[in-house]
Amino acid sequence: MRSGRSGRLNSPRAAGTSIRLRSSANTSAAIRSVIAKLSGRDLNFRNSNREHVVRITVASFLCILVSVAATTLKADSTPWGYDGHRIVCSIAWRNMTPATQIAVQELLNQDSLRFQQFEEACLWADEVRGDNPEYDRFTTAHYVNLPRRSDGVDPESHCALSLCIVQAISEQREILADSKRSTRERLDALKWVAHFVGDVHQPMHVGYGDDRGGNRIAIILAGQPTNLHSLWDYGLIAHSGLEWNVYARRLGYDISPVDRRQWASPNPIEWADESYSITEDTVYEFPLGSEVKDEYYYRNIQTVERQLKKAGIRLANLLNGVFDV
């Protein structure tokens, strides 16, 4: 565990603080339209009475796509919950052994949703979020919120009241590996694990509880209001202008043997601690109340890309450990 930090990042930015990201010349009208529709969504909203998550359903997202089709909407308008997860799972698929790929595909073939690609199955956890009471316990499993100046993630204290992301990854991995479980249970476990491994590598999913993982930090992105959480979900990825499959291949080619060794940890708590370090050291590093310029992107995009690559390798390792042992 890390020791607590003291310094500029330990002075919490007030809830509702506004920052501004200057729109660059290559930012399309399409992303502005989508951001306008996404604005106000609080991904990790918690109140004193009950856990409540506001999410974008697949149907509403498709409506957004239709509404901006004329502007040649690309992958740069969809969130980490879409393109980011596709990138993670594409990297993972290419790093699974043939035996693992066969086992994963055999499970997916049993799904009534008929996913054409593993990458699409990785979006399912967001698609059912808040829609089906059967999955209500997973509402909080997409993230873990910590007090500021925490030494790291401690499931006994930070996950005491509800299922959090590190618990969910471990729990669902065990179900996936248990051949005595039903096909339905193992199929759901595959989709949960594939999604949550991506989420835990997004720093704002291991964020501060007092600003709801950055949801209460208002920003302007491409001329439209959104929040810091969304900036890290999709805004930084969007700035690349790359289609998700092109981006995934580029990042996959960039993974070295040294990277693979350094990212070999199988422990979700360690993964969460790494994300929390980024939250503490990087995410809030902008002057209070000022406009955040393109420098913020250039300073942080390598971190985003490293986290996507890590998540892909670790998801592949996890699934190889389940299906090819």
Image: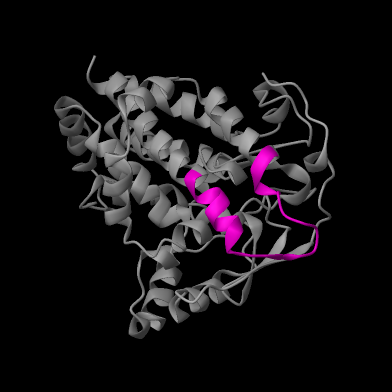
The residue sitting at 20% across, 52% down in the picture is 116
Q: Give the x, y percent position of residue 37.
A: 54, 75
Q: Give the x, y percent position of residue 295.
A: 59, 58
80 sits left or right of 153 in the view = left
Q: Quadrant of residue 18?
A: bottom right
Q: Quadrant of residue 2?
A: top right
Residue 238 belongs to magenta span: no
Q: Quadrant of the N terminus?
A: top right
Compared with 308, 265 (above or below) is: above
How does the figure colour the protein chain or chains? one colour
Compared with 276, 226 (above or below) is: below
Q: Give the x, y percent position of residue 38.
A: 55, 69
Relative depth, front residue between 209 and 242: 242
Relative depth, front residue between 258 and 210: 258
Q: How many marks?
A: 0
Of all residues, the one furthest to the top in this rendering is 325
Q: Quadrant of the C terminus?
A: top left
Compared with 33, 274 (above or below) is: above
Of all residues, the one furthest to the bottom in this rendering is 70
289 sits left or right of 251 in the view = right
Relative depth, front residue between 138 and 142: 142
206 sits left or right of 131 in the view = right
The residue sitting at 71% across, 32% down in the picture is 161
Residue 134 can be seen, yes or no = no
Q: Give the x, y percent position of residue 281.
A: 68, 39
The residue sitting at 60% across, 34% down in the picture is 164
**Residues drawn in magenta:** 281-302
Residue 293 belongs to magenta span: yes
Residue 290 can be seen, yes or no = yes
